[in-house]
Image (spheres, coloured by chain):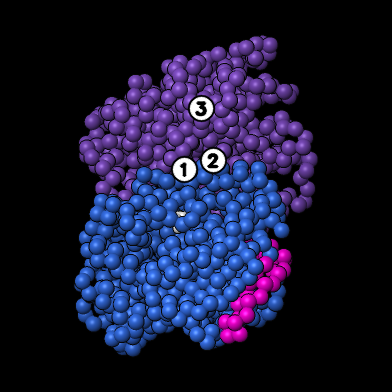
């Protein structure tokens, strides 16, 4: 087989057994890998509670992993989120994915609960469980340092062990499987880490064709100002967006009560470069290298993190923000949800934390001590307990990232239709509403957005199944990536065919969610965005969203998706019709 | 979306890339519909209904170049591969459907091809282009196909002359009637130096519009900037030169802010030109004859196989230097600044023209017009020699493209 290896490793933690199985070729062709394949393998488990012993935690690479396709050394981790209750996947870069493919597996399925803490060690001949009692309770850097001699590491920190609902799984090089709390799922299984050490090469079906497509991708990446421009992601990382969001007056400030923060220049891309001597860093095998680190190797925060530990909490102290980011990484927690939960709590108690308090709060969350016990549950549950549910700026319990929906109407809709909750990456309308890629759309108009969001969701589901990084698509397109895929696998794919695969994945996810009780009532923005204006100025008006117009567009989305007006499936047999 | 359809239908007419009455644009939001002449509108609707995309343009170009490229291609060919930068970077190739292959399944076949590419040539019908997320994108893709087929046909003529009965007469009509004289006569400019924000924004928008209205460039391809103190005012990426209001980024020269992340992909080239030549204004566009002529090369023993990116030479068209270099970080920003300082103009292989001005925009616009007029005249001089004296083509074809200097 070319592109894929066609094998999966199944691990039963309860029984302590690892088995190697074949993956039917037709499933690989129909779901590709990554998110798509993982979602398909959730078909028999999607109704289980996230902490049910039988709930699988799936690591899935794609057919381009292990090749020189730009940004494709990635995997998706799929399960059901304890934070949102939805089907959940997250894409992460790093050598782990590359080594898992190198060990000869497209997919790793972990179920059961180990009687004691364990580490799963994977090689080309299978998996082995070794005790992890001494690692239990340690931070990510300590765990990684202890295990990296065995291979590439994916681990949880104290937050995952303690069931923080937004706990991450962290990759050894610092990449995170973030947002939905899959670290807590791993913690519940008493699985401290997975280590993998494969080195087989992927076999490419058509080398010359692959090389031509790769050259085409690289040409487009170089042509994109957002990627390789002198103010782009390769130079400044995602914090390049700090100044832009300020200028567009859509930087969420003080728990989304404002959209403009006067001091954000103190943690902008240029400020970070000057103050932290930022150097390039990034995912294994990625030519863009959008991540930034200090010369000492400390990872610097991404845009969403600086903005949420910054403006969202009214903090402008860059060193405090960098420290908060580092702590989250060490404790294994999602930075967006952590910062947004703290901000919601801050507004509820009438005072946002000052910079010096943040570290203590984050430690208390990871260890579920003091106020951390409340905050570890995420903003939706915390504000409900405090009697101020309107202050949780979340959708389906997932805290919104740092793009205020009043400043980009496609983003407003996409937050709601996202199957995993308030996430900017499912349809990523920031690309056209703000970054003008592939073309600009009017950010203050709903016109056409239902169709645009549907197409982008489908496309991105395919991207997440290749698995490639979405930033590549700020330059290249599915035209070039379908060529890479066809050349790698020897199976012909077109961009249209890939969108149809993406559509199948999105609808399957929605079907799972509907089976767990989700419908149009969960596809809603917090009231604040319909009743309060943002911070207008510099000739830019940020009025509240028009609820009637929003509802119309949401209904259009349902019609385009073939759903009922309640956002559900008219056909209960949908799943059986899918491969 | 009807306003978008009206807007881009009007643009197709204004830039004379489609014949009136043959333009149809289909869109689908939750409903699918098409606006335009028949049978194009029905066809457009049928094709878009097969695609996961928002908009589609079907129109017949006023020039038969795309159809002639199909006739010139070998019987087994299924696509043409123009070699201008636009095609190389964004289109890759342009599939086509011959007249004799068209049947009742035409819409499905076109949709099948558009499932993999941005535009398709349908012989006898016209150009079909898709826009994944906007009507504008479908228009841009149509323009790209029109541009690339135009450039390729002109190149092929220089190589092979006229091949078919009536081809020469058709081309004569194009030369006499479709091509307009290029001139800056009658245009008003602000005199430099441009110093005030509002005046700068207004002048950039005005001059951008001039370049399109005068038929010098297509609206979507190109960029424009002005230096004022510590700022470069530059058009945004993907901005149309004839629709610049609201699409200009002020970018600090010292990179103290990153709001300019949305600026043109050629920001780095503009900045380096300002740094190295001390000029005040820059204009960049893709006039077609300059693009064609830039790709003529007299070298016969050259080992470089990626001329667009790797050619180390500075060649000349008249007194305008020609250099290689791909878009953005692809090398153009390194290769143009050293050669543009003296003449205030430079051509990038297969791509387009950069011109500069000391203070205002009269100078760079006039320079770009002069470059394109020279390339146009030179093209026709060569074509006439090829077609009137076919034996002369192999010796004369590249004579005016001289190598003046060594590597840069
Ligand atoms: S662009 Fe950034 S996030 Fe994406 S693969 Fe590269 S380094 Fe990783």
Q: Chain of mark 1?
A: A
Compute the Cα span from label 1 to label 3: 18 Å
Residue A468, given in percent of the width and then of the height, sits at 54, 58
| Structural crowding at the residue carrying mark 1, measured as other residues with C-alpha within 10 Å and reported as few (<14), some (14–19) or many (≥20) | many
Q: Is residue B362 above or below residue A250?
A: above
Q: Chain of mark 2?
A: B
Q: Nearer the viewer, residue A203 or A135?
A: A135
Compute the Cα span from label 3 to label 2: 17 Å
Q: Quadrant of residue A197?
A: bottom right
Q: Chain of mark 3?
A: B
Specify the colour of chain A: blue
Q: Is residue A547 visible?
A: no
Whether the residue under disc 1 has CB within 8 Å of ligand 1: no
Disc with the residue nearer the chain's start (3 vs 2): 2
Chain drawn purple in the picture: B
Residue located beneath label 1 in the image: A223
Q: Nearer the viewer, residue B254 or B285?
A: B254
Residue located beneath label 2 in the image: B89
- Dot 1: what SS? helix
Q: Nearer the viewer, residue B370 or A465?
A: A465
Q: What residue sits 51% from the left and 75% below the top? A: A119
| Structural crowding at the residue carrying mark 3, measured as other residues with C-alpha within 10 Å and reported as few (<14), some (14–19) or many (≥20) | some
Q: Please state the extent of the stretch shown in magenta in the rendering.
A: A7-35
Q: Which mark is residue B311?
A: 3
Q: Is residue B387 above or below residue A112?
A: above
């Amino acid at each position: 087989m070319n592109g894929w290896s066609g094998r999966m490793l199944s691990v039963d933690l309860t029984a302590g057994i690892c088995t190697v199985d074949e993956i039917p070729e037709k499933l690989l062709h129909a779901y590709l890998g990554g998110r798509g394949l993982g979602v398909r393998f959730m078909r028999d488990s999607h109704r289980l509670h996230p902490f049910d012993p039988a709930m699988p935690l799936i690591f899935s690479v794609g057919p381009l992993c292990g090749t020189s396709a730009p940004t494709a050394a990635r995997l998706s981790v799929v399960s059901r989120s304890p934070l949102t209750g939805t089907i959940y996947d997250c894409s992460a870069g790093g050598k782990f994915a590359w080594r898992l493919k190198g060990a000869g597996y497209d997919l790793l399925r972990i179920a059961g609960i180990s009687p004691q803490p364990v580490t799963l060690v994977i090689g080309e001949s299978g998996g082995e469980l070794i005790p992890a009692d001494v690692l239990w309770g340690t931070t990510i850097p300590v765990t990684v340092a202890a295990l990296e001699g065995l291979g590439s590491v994916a681990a949880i920190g104290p937050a995952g062990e303690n069931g923080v609902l937004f706990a991450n799984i962290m990759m050894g090089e610092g990449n995170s499987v973030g947002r939905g709390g899959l670290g807590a799922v791993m913690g519940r299984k008493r699985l401290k880490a997975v280590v993998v050490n494969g080195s087989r090469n992927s076999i490419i079906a058509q080398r010359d064709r692959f090389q031509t497509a790769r050259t085409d991708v690289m040409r487009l990446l170089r042509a994109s100002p957002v990627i390789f421009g002198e103010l782009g992601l390769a130079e400044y990382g995602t914090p390049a967006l700090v100044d832009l969001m300020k200028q567009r007056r859509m930087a969420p400030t003080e728990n989304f009560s404002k959209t403009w923060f006067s001091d954000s220049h103190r943690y902008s891309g240029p400020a970070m470069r000057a103050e932290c001597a930022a150097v390039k860093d990034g995912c294994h095998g990625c030519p863009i290298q959008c991540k930034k680190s200090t010369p000492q190797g400390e990872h610097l925060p991404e845009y969403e993190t600086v903005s949420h530990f910054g403006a969202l909490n009214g903090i402008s102290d860059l060193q405090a923000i960098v420290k908060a980011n580092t702590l989250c990484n060490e404790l294994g927690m999602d930075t967006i949800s952590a910062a947004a939960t703290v901000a919601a709590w801050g507004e509820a108690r009438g005072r946002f934390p000052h910079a010096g308090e943040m570290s203590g709060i984050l430690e208390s969350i990871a260890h579920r001590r003091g106020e951390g016990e409340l905050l570890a549950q995420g903003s939706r549950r915390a504000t409900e307990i405090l009697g101020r549910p309107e202050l949780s700026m979340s959708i389906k319990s997932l805290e919104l990232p740092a793009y205020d929906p009043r400043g980009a109407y496609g983003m407003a809709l996409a937050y709601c239709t996202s199957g995993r909750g308030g996430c900017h990456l499912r349809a990523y309308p920031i690309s056209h509403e703000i970054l003008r890629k592939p073309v600009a759309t009017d950010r203050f108009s709903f016109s056409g957005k239902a169709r645009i969001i549907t197409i982008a969701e489908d496309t991105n589901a395919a991207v997440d199944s290749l698995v490639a990084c979405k930033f590549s698509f700020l330059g290249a397109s599915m035209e070039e990536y379908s060529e890479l895929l066809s050349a790698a696998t020897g199976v012909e794919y077109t961009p249209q065919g890939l969108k149809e695969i993406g559509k199948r994945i999105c609808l399957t996810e929605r079907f799972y969610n509907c089976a767990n009780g989700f419908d149009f009532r969960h596809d809603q923005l917090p009231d604040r965005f319909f009743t309060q204006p943002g911070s207008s100025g510099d000739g830019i008006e940020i009025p509240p969203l028009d609820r009637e117009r929003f509802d119309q567009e949401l209904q259009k989305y349902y019609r385009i998706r073939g759903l009922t007006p309640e956002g559900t499936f008219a056909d209960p047999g949908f799943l059986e019709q899918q491969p | 979306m009807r306003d978008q359809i009206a807007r881009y239908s009007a643009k197709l007419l204004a830039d004379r890339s489609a014949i009136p009455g043959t333009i149809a644009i289909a869109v689908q939001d939750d409903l699918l519909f098409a606006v335009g002449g028949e049978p194009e509108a029905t066809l457009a609707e049928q094709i878009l209904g097969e695609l996961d995309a928002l908009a589609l343009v079907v129109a017949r170009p006023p020039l038969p170049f795309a159809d002639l490229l199909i006739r010139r291609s070998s019987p087994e060919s299924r696509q043409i591969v123009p070699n201008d930068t636009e095609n190389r970077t964004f289109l890759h190739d342009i599939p086509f459907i011959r007249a004799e292959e068209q049947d009742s399944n035409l819409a499905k076949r076109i949709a099948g091809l558009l499932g993999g590419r941005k535009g398709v040539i349908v012989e006898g019908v016209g150009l079909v282009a898709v826009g994944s997320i906007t009507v504008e994108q479908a228009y841009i893709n149509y323009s790209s196909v029109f541009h690339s087929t135009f450039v390729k046909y002109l190149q092929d003529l220089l190589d092979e002359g006229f091949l078919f009965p009536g081809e020469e007469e058709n081309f004569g009509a194009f030369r006499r009637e479709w091509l307009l004289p290029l001139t800056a006569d009658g245009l008003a400019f602000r005199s430099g130096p441009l110093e005030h924000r509002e005046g700068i924004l207004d002048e950039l928008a005005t001059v951008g519009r001039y370049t399109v209205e005068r038929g010098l460039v297509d609206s979507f391809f190109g960029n424009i900037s002005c230096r004022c103190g510590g700022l470069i005012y530059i058009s945004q990426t993907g901005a149309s030169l004839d629709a610049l209001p609201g699409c200009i980024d002020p970018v600090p020269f010292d990179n103290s802010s990153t709001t300019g992340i949305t600026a043109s992909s050629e920001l780095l080239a503009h900045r380096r030109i300002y740094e190295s030549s001390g000029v005040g204004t820059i204009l960049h566009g893709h006039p077609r004859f300059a693009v064609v002529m830039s790709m003529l090369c007299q070298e016969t023993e050259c080992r470089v196989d990626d001329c667009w990116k790797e050619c180390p030479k500075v060649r000349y068209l008249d007194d305008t230097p020609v250099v290689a270099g791909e878009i953005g970080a692809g090398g153009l920003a390194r290769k143009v600044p050293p050669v543009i300082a003296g003449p205030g103009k430079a051509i990038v292989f297969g791509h387009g023209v950069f011109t500069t001005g000391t203070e205002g925009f009269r100078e760079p616009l006039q320079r770009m017009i002069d470059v394109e007029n020279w390339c146009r005249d030179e093209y026709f001089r060569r074509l006439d020699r090829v077609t009137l004296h076919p034996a002369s083509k192999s010796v004369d074809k590249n004579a005016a493209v001289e190598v003046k200097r060594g590597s840069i």
